[in-house]
Amino acid sequence: MVARLFAGGTAGALIPLSLAWIGDAIPYERRQPVLARFLLGQMFGIALGQLVGGLGADHWGAPPVFVLLAAAFAGSTVLLWRFAPASTTSNAPVAASGTIAARFAAVLRIGWARVVLTAVFLEGVLLFGALAFVPTHLNRAYGLPLTAAGSMLMLYGLGGMVYAALSGPLVRRLGEPGLAAAGGALILVCFATIALFRLPLLAAAACFTAGLGFYMLHNTLQVNATQMAPAQRGSSVALFASCLFLGQSCGVSLAGYASERLGTDPVILFGGAAVLVLAVCFALARRHVASQARATVR
């Protein structure tokens, strides 16, 4: 438990620091495709983790998996040390110094920041809670070995590759509200397919398409997180990541409790439906904020 606590406190800094650096280095109008490529690596790592976990459960046992993870972190540490990014000059206003609590409070005083943080927390609860039990569902309901179930979930990361390749045209065609709403709709369709049918090929296609839908939604949340408090970008993306991680923890716990009593089918189906509601609500809020900004400029 102590080791897990320290792992979260150290590795948990990687994503918000990366987001803050991208926010400083890349102009807002070009930021979403860059964040899409960043998110690709993040989510492909999660999908690969499902595969390695399945292999460990079926063939190796747990200890080699943890050794492999430690080696991966050691390798990434060497790469970061060797290829440290050059310092960037940000156009954002300089934040006033203060304690961590004061900087977090400054972010939370911004209404749009509270909307984004609430949305990503709920995304963590609803989406990742259901997603964590997809391999278990494929194992129990479909009769697939855990290795095969984990391999199928890797297609989730491949769906992200498609989004990374198409992010520019998708952003121009749909805009941020359209991306969020369409992503939520795809997630519902895919989760319903996984929960209600027992066809492995159809489930594989659903895992792939669910990855595309997730990237559409989460990438939109990420790009808003980098701009919701420019003067406190480091603190704002740290809060964003914390809300996501807390949501994931709560979601997996709640989904585990529900799965033991109701089964994995309703958990996955409810997660998809609830994510769609969340995505539509965020899309409407984003459109409202954008219309207000245009009215202010006029």
Image: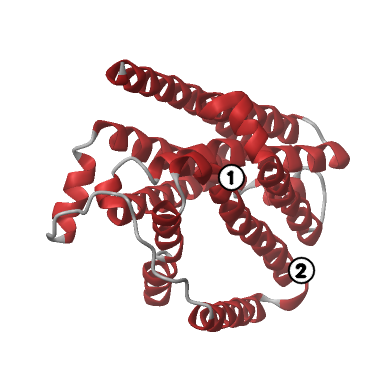
Image mark for residue 58 = 2
How many other residues sit within 10 Å of disc 2, few (<14), some (14-19) or many (≥20)?
Answer: few
Quarter of the view holding residue 203: top right
Closest to the observer, 207 or 264: 207
Position of 54 relative to 211 (above/below):
below
- Quadrant occupied by the N terminus: bottom left
Quarter of the view holding residue 67: bottom right
Residue linked to disc 1? 33
* Image position, residue 288 (x, y; %): 38, 18
Left or right, residue 239 beside residue 127: left
How many other residues sit within 10 Å of disc 1, few (<14), some (14-19) or many (≥20)?
Answer: many
Under mark 1, the amino acid is Pro
Quarter of the view holding residue 224: top left
* Element under disc 1: helix
* Between discs 1 and 2, the one toward the N terminus: 1
Closest to the observer, 134 or 24: 24
Position of 188 relative to 66 (above/below):
above
* Element under disc 2: helix
